[in-house]
Image: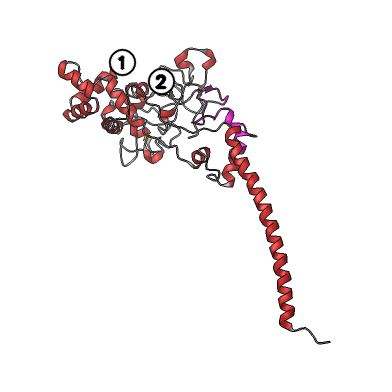
Amino acid sequence: MTAPRRDTVLSANGRALFVLLSALMVLSIAGCSDDGDEDLVQREDLRAAFDLRTVSAVPYPPDNPPIAERVELGRLLFFDPILSGPDNISCGTCHHPAFAWADGSEFSVGMSGEVPGIGPTGVGPERVLTDPFNFITTPRNSPTCINSGCSSQPDGEPHYLGTQFWDGRADGLEEQAKLPIESFDEMRGFDYVARDAMERVLEDLQGIPEYTQLFRGAFPEEAAEMDAFPERHVIREDTYARAIAAYERELISVNSPYDTYVRGDDWALVEDQFEGMRLFFEKAQCGSCHHGPMLSSYEYAVTGVAQAGPGRDPAVRGGDGKDWGREEHTDDPFDEYAFRVPTLR
């Protein structure tokens, strides 16, 4: 018998190997396709299962739309130390963009502190108390200003009257903007008493012609009123508060991978992030308090842990060394040691 040619044997073996590999590839692709389809369905289903929502639009008050001149005026005011009693710190001292619009400190140091080598204008966690006669830290940390314009009332949707501060003592950014200048340890200091703070700050601003012009451009209706009634200055409490609020309302960050996923991109989250989200909303039950568009219920919770800070200083704040939380403003004993659930944005 004539032996088969070597190239014929190799060709036959090659064809057999090709058929085998092709069959394995088809099975592999089919298996991956099934797994991929299952994973895709799972990723789609979790949006509804967890009621995942992102911020759809910034809620603006009817009397404070996002006018460019007003937002820019608010930015100038936000970073101007003229708002403080000693004229040495601004809103941006404790809410600085370099520190996620906060200050990176456990307890914020307001008008009493400085960064060594820089002075009172320094910002960040290196800011320390230096004045031996005025060594007051604030009893709480500074919350970030990012997305503060999208807060809500407890278990509500984002609203322009959403609660502000850890104890919820202000509804809306316009109301919030008025209070730090009255606070002794935040911005006022010894220069005047709380009830005179707004009047003093407005007088300082009215004394600067450039600010008057900026306010006129940002508030044309109030400027026209001032033209008709000169005693009704365009720089007043409501325009001051609306300007700062207009700027703060534009500090928005709602385009994270999470937001992209919620809006419909199934693969915006990598596998570890996706599994972390499942754990967050399922087994860990974090979503029971951190849910909704802002990942917060904006309710008030008593954590049951010991007070970490100095509380309300007895000598200056009229307190007893404790921080009573929301009860300080509601006089409701059920609000004792209760604080707003923080947003995770």
Foreground pick, 112 / 215: 215
The three-letter amino acid code for the residue at tag 2 is: Ala
Return the mark for residue 170: 2
Residue 330, image x, y percentages: 46, 14
Give the distance between the C-alpha atoms of the residues marked 1 and 2, in whole angstroms: 17 Å
Q: What kind of colouring is applied to the model shown?
A: secondary structure
Residue 38, image x, y percentages: 65, 44
Q: What element carries label 1?
A: helix
Other-residue count near label 1 (Cα within 10 Å), few / some / many at <14 / 14–19 / ≥20: few
Does residue 6 show up? Answer: yes
Overall secondary structure of the magenta stretch?
Answer: loop
What are the residue bounds of the magenta stretch? 278-305
The three-letter amino acid code for the residue at tag 1 is: Arg
Horizontal side of 28 relative to 306 (left or right) equals right
Q: Is mark 2 on a helix, strand or loop?
A: strand
Foreground pick, 133 / 81: 81
Foreground pick, 244 / 101: 244
Q: Is residue 85 magenta?
A: no
Q: In this view, does 269 lie above or below 289?
A: below
Viewer-nearest of discs 1 and 2: 2
Residue 166, image x, y percentages: 46, 25
